[in-house]
Amino acid sequence: MTDLENRAPLCEAEFIAGFHAIGAERYHHRHPFHLLMHEGHLTRGQLQAWALNRYAYQSYIPIKDAAILARSEDPEFRRAWRKRIIDHDGDAAHAGGIEKWLRLVEATGLSRELALRAEGILPATRYAVEAYVHLVSTRPFLEAVASSLTELFSGKLIALRMDRLRQHYPWLSGGLDYFQGRLTQAPADAEFALAWVVRNARTREEQERAWGALRAKCDILWAMLDALHFAYVAPAWPPPGAFRPAENPR
């Protein structure tokens, strides 16, 4: 037996506290690229690069959620989880998160067609998106669900981002509908996923694996911002084929 197999499971409060500790340390609200954004120090071109690359990630969220959905044999779970796909894909009556992010791309001054063609996306963005889909498709199901728990921390970041984008980049204000919707969607999604993980992580080893999945998701988000910072802030070396901003001010 391993040491983890010999250890008793943590109580619910300790288990949940572990997720929040991971978020405080590793969530991408602490990344220098986001700090520059929230302080108003990014140029229009840098924000264009962020919006374009982040769209590549956003466009795969319903694909990621469909992969999780397809793995579940529980109708109750599937009914709850499929809401996420509708939230991002939209339906006949409402625009989804993907359409709203395209509007944000357009608000930066780029065309939606550029985003839809995924032209100029950083290689690291492509790898990160593929890594996330691979994680939820191949890791144990508990870990796939636990990886979504970055939503526990996104509410505060989204509220701060909306405030700072309006303050420092008023020309973006017409493209912020995505964030408004996520203010209510993300907490509801996180509440369901957390309750499910807490209920289904029955051993200490499973609890540790759930924490590990959240760390892995945080690493994916952090790696995407590392690539953006390297390509567009310092040393500002976009790789061959990557989007290159026009030389213009904020």
Image: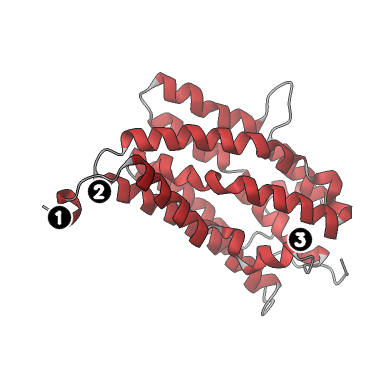
Residue extending furthest toward the bottom: 235
Cα separation between marks 1 and 2: 9 Å
Q: Residue 29 appears at what percent x and percent y?
A: 61, 59
Neighbour class for label 2 at 10 Å: few (<14), some, many (≥20)?
A: some
- For discs 1 and 3, the disc positioned in front in the rendered view: 1
The circle drawn on residue 47 is 3
Q: Earlier in the sequence, mark 3 or mark 2?
A: 3
Q: Is residue 241 above or below residue 192?
A: below
Question: Relative to residue 29, is residue 130 drawn left or right?
Answer: left
Residue of label 1: 2
Residue of label 2: 205
Q: Amino acid at mark 2?
A: Glu
Quadrant housing residue 91: top right
Q: Answer yes or no: do the residues labelled 1 and 2 have beta carbons within 8 Å?
A: yes
The residue at 31%/39% (across/down) is 201
Q: Earlier in the sequence, mark 1 or mark 2?
A: 1
Q: Is residue 117 above or below residue 65?
A: below
Give whichever of 4, 250 is nearer the camera.
4
Task: Please tell me whether mark 3 sits on a helix, a strand or a loop.
Answer: helix
- For discs 3 and 2, the disc positioned in front in the rendered view: 2
The residue at 70%/46% (across/down) is 116
The circle drawn on residue 23 is none
Give whichever of 184, 244 is nearer the camera.
184
The residue at 10%/52% (across/down) is 1
Give whichever of 225, 115 is nearer the camera.
225
Q: Amino acid at mark 1?
A: Thr
Q: Earlier in the sequence, mark 1 or mark 3?
A: 1
